[in-house]
Amino acid sequence: STELFGRKYDLPFGMAPVGMTGLMWPGAELMLARSARRTNIPYCLSTVACETPEDVGRTAGENGWFQLYTFADWAINEDLLKRAGDSGFSVLVITVDLPAPSMRERQRRAGLRVPPKITPQFIANVLARPAWALATRKRGKPAFRMLEKYLGGEDMRDLPKFLADQQVGTLYRWKDLARFRKLWKGPIVIKGLLDTEDARCAVEEGMDGIVVSNHGGRQFDGAPASISVLPEIAETVGGKTAIVFDSGVRTGLDVLRALALGADFVLAGRPYLYGAAAHGEAGADHVSHILATDLANNMVQLGVSRLSQLRGLAVA
């Protein structure tokens, strides 16, 4: 088990925030939240989720973390945090590595866009996945339910302009953190740091934790791999704030590597999406089982029995 932010979790890893999770499978956010609560690991809900914080909060309980992209309209920030707090989320994660929209060529080639463009390829993909199509038809068209009340409607076509007008995710100043502290009574974590000086600033501002992350390699192609900067950041601020590692985690060995290099905890995003998309809630449970089993097996290979013994070990 691992203790983090005053709570004991059964595993040293949790579910990272991923936007539009409900597009992968209808109701996937709720599936992941139930799985996280059952496994006793954190589930971090994205600002651009397809479910509301009220529904996910009831499902996740204290295992729920809430990820925030800031809005130019502070009334929206305040309302989102109030909704999340009232819904039982225990940790606030503020993402700061999105100063501007990125190109994401691979995503564009795959045809992922909001709203979706109906093309022959799109239709072929839907027909090739009848279970997904039927589940989506039963639940209704995907929508950004988290943000619907601020859009003034339920149409996804409204979202891109709304996000651009609100400069979502782009307004970050260190002095603003004091404002968030007044709005949120629980632990606050800054996600998206790759620099030791930023890590120092986070500590000076009294942040409870940082997430060493390059946004899954999707935001800036020139960014360093998160794992490459983790040791220096851990040496700089380790013991002064909780260090969470994110980006590129696919196996239990990846979790072990991060813990050995100085992380206190690890987040995984895509593996849980793969599990939920392939086999729903049971798929998410299975991902946790795979990661935990792989982590335990590799600890045996190293001759250690406690997570604390991993720190500083040389692992390729």
Image (cartoon, helix red, strand yellow):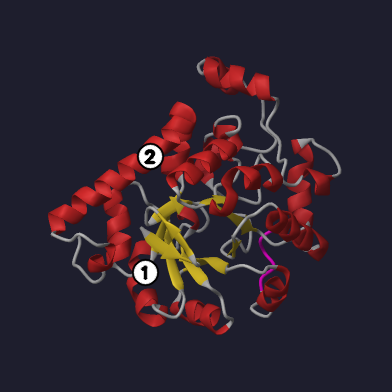
Q: Nearer the viewer, mark 1 or mark 2?
A: 2
Q: Of marks 1 and 2, which one's residue comes earlier in the chain?
A: 1
Is 269 on the left-hand or right-hand side of 153? left
Q: Secondary structure at mark 1?
A: helix
Residue 120 visible, this orientation: no
User: Majority secondary structure of the magenta segment?
Assistant: loop
Kindly identify which residue carries mark 1: 230
Q: In the rendering, which numbered label is found on residue 119?
A: none
Q: Residue at image x 24%, y 50%?
A: 296
Determine the image quadrant of residue 271.
Answer: top left
Q: Residues within 10 Å of mark 1 (few under 14, many from 20)?
A: many
The amino acid at mark 2 is Val
Kindly identify which residue carries mark 2: 287
For the residues labelled 1 and 2, the Cα–Cα distance comes to: 24 Å
User: Where residue 53 appears, x then y in whole percent?
Assistant: 68, 48
Please tell me how many numbered marks the rendered image carries: 2
Q: Residue at image x 66%, y 19%?
A: 137
Q: Residue furthest right?
A: 152
Quadrant of the drawing holding the N terminus: bottom left
Up/down of 200 relative to 37, above or below:
below
Residue numbers of the magenta segment: 167-172
Compare residues 133 and 126 and report the one nearer the observer. Answer: 133
Is 27 on the left-hand or right-hand side of 313? right
Up/down of 145 relative to 210, above or below:
above
Up/down of 270 relative to 232, above or below:
above
Determine the image quadrant of residue 304.
Answer: bottom left
Quadrant of the drawing holding the C terminus: bottom left
Q: Residue furthest bottom?
A: 204
User: Where residue 76 appears, x then y in whole percent?
Assistant: 79, 58
Compare residues 38 and 158 and report the one nearer the observer. Answer: 38
